[in-house]
Image (cartoon, rainbow, N blue to C red):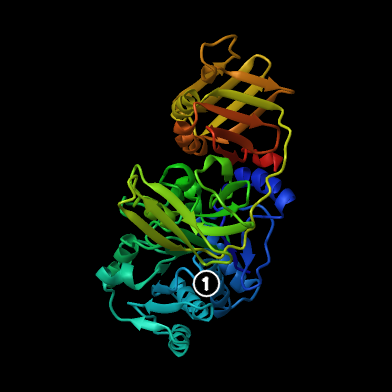
Amino acid sequence: MRLLYRCNASHCEIKSLLNWVKLEYNITCESIMAGTGKVYKGPISYLTQKQAIELDQELFNKYKFSVDQLMELAGLSVATAVARVYPPSTHKTALVICGPGNNGGDGLVAARHMVLFGYTVAVYYPKRTPKPLYENLLEQCIKFGVKIEETLPATLMKNKYNVMVDALFGFSFKPPVREELKPALDALINAEIPVCSVDVPSGWNVETGPEKDKAVTPSLLVSLSAPKLCAQPIYLDTKGQELLSIIKFDIFTITLNNLNQNLQAMDNSHVSLVSLTLRADGFDKYRCDRNISMGMNLASMSKILKCAGDKDTVTMKAQDCADTVTFVFESPNQEKVSDYEMKLMNLDLEHLGIPETEYSCTIRMPSGEFARICRDLSQFGESMVISCTKEGVKFSASGDIGSANVKLAQTASVDKEEEAVVIEMDEPVTLTFACQYLNYFTKATSLSPQVQLSMSADVPLVVEYRIQDIGQIRYYLAPKIEEDDS
C-alpha cells in the first residue's frame, strides 16, 4: 500500500517531539493513507534506490498489486497532499509536468483528482508513453476538463499558475536528460511558484540528493511507499531565513484574543515548533472582540511586510470568519497610506496548547554567547550535547576533525544582569540536539540580550528569547534519541 509521507525528519529526531506533541494535542506524524485521511503511526525509514525497486517488485509479485492500482493510489495521495498544503482557495491554478515513466502516470492521476478538489489544472506531457494505460489516463484527464499544454510559455508561468506538480522523473532516473525533456526540467528549476515533487525531485540522485547547484528545489515532497534517502533534511533544508521562516516554517497560525496575539508553526520535518506571543499591552492600539485564528503563508506575508518603510506604522485587520487579512502601512506624517490584502489559508490544525512542563534544568545566559557556542561547535559535528550538572553547563561536539567542549559556570557577580550565567537545577540532564536547528534559533539573538534554555529528560528543549515590553519567542526542539532506545 502506498502511503503519503510529508515528514522528512530522521527517526531518532522525530520520535521524541511528536510523541510529546501527540500526548498533549493528539497530533502525529503526517503519514496519511491515500484517500482515507487516516494517520499512520510508526517509525520512518529511508530507502535506497535498490530497496525502493525491491519494494515495488514485492508489491507486484507477492501482494499482486497492478501498476494501475498503485498509480491510482499514488496520484490520489499526491493530490491530497497538494490540497492540504496549497489548497485551491489560495492556489487555484495548477500545472502538472509529467514525464514518460510511472511518475508521469502518477501525475496524470493527480491532475484528474485535483480537478475534483476544485483546482483549474493543466498538464504538460512532452514525451508521451505509447501504452494503453498512459493513453487512457491522458484521455481521462481531457474528459475531466484538464487542459493539455503543448508548450511551456516560461515568461507566463508565474502569472498563469499558482502551484506546480513535478511528476517528471522518479527514483529510476539516470542522467543525462533527453533534449525533449530539458524545457520541462528547466521550468521546474526556475519556477517562482511552489513546486510539489512526486517521490523524488526531478533530476536528483535518489540517494545523494541534488548533483548540481542549479536543481529543482521543491517546497513540498510527497514520498511514495516510504521516503527515499534524498528526502533527508540535509538535502531538503538548505535555506536558513530569519526567525519563523527558518527550517521551512512555511505555514503558521495566528490566534488572537483580548489579551495577546499568538503565532505558532511547526517545521516540515516536525522536529521543531515555534511559538511567538505578543501581549496586547505592547501595541499602540489593539482590539479583539472575540477569539479568532488565521492561517497564513509566511512567504506571502513576508513579501507584504517588505513593502513597509522603516518608520511606518503597521496595522493588521481582519473581520470575523474572513478569508483575507489586511495590512495597512502609514508613514510617520500620514502623507502616505498603503494597504495590502492577503488571502488566508484554510488550515486543519488548531492552535496548540503547549503543555505546562516542570523542567529539571533552566539556564539563562547571554544570547550572543549562546550564538557563538552554537556556531563554533557546529564546525566539529552535526550534533551538540548539552549537559547540565552541579558544576555548570557543558556544550560538546565531535566529528572527523576532532572534538570541542565549552564549559560555563554560574557567575558570582556581574555589572550587567544580561551578562550573567544563571543555572537552576533539580537534577542533572544530558541531551543531544541537531546543531543545524540550534544555529537557526540563534537568528533571534538580536531580539533579546539573554536566552533561556529549559531541559528535562525525554522532552523537547525550549530556547526562549524575551522581547522587552511585549512578549517572547520560544523554539521547541526534539532531542536526538539513539535507535536502540526507540
Residue at 54% x, 59% y is: 295
* Quadrant including the N terminus: bottom right
Q: Position of residue 342 (x, y in %)?
A: 44, 62
**Quadrant of residue 349 within the rendered picture:** bottom right
The answer to whether residue 74 of the structure is visible from this angle is yes
The answer to whether residue 277 of the structure is visible from this angle is no
Residue underneath mark 1:
79
Q: Nearer the viewer, residue 476 or 486?
A: 476
| Disc 1: CA contacts within 10 A as few (<14), some (14-19) or many (>=20) | many
Left or right: residue 177 versus residue 90 is left
How many marks do you count on the picture? 1
Q: Position of residue 146 (x, y in %)?
A: 42, 83
Q: Amino acid at mark 1?
A: Ala
Residue at 33% x, 60% y is: 189
Residue at 74% x, 23% y is: 426
Residue that extends furthest to the top in the rendered view of this protein: 412
* Quadrant including the C terminus: top right
Q: Nearer the viewer, residue 247 or 207?
A: 247
Q: Is residue 105 above or below residue 7?
A: below
Residue at 57% x, 41% y is: 281
Q: Position of residue 121 (x, y in %)?
A: 42, 78
Q: Is residue 293 above or below residue 355?
A: below
Q: Nearer the viewer, residue 180 or 14?
A: 14
Residue that extends furthest to the bottom in the rendered view of this protein: 143
Q: Position of residue 224 (x, y in %)?
A: 55, 64
As helix, strand or loop, the secondary structure at mark 1 comes to helix
Q: Is residue 454 above or below residue 351?
A: above
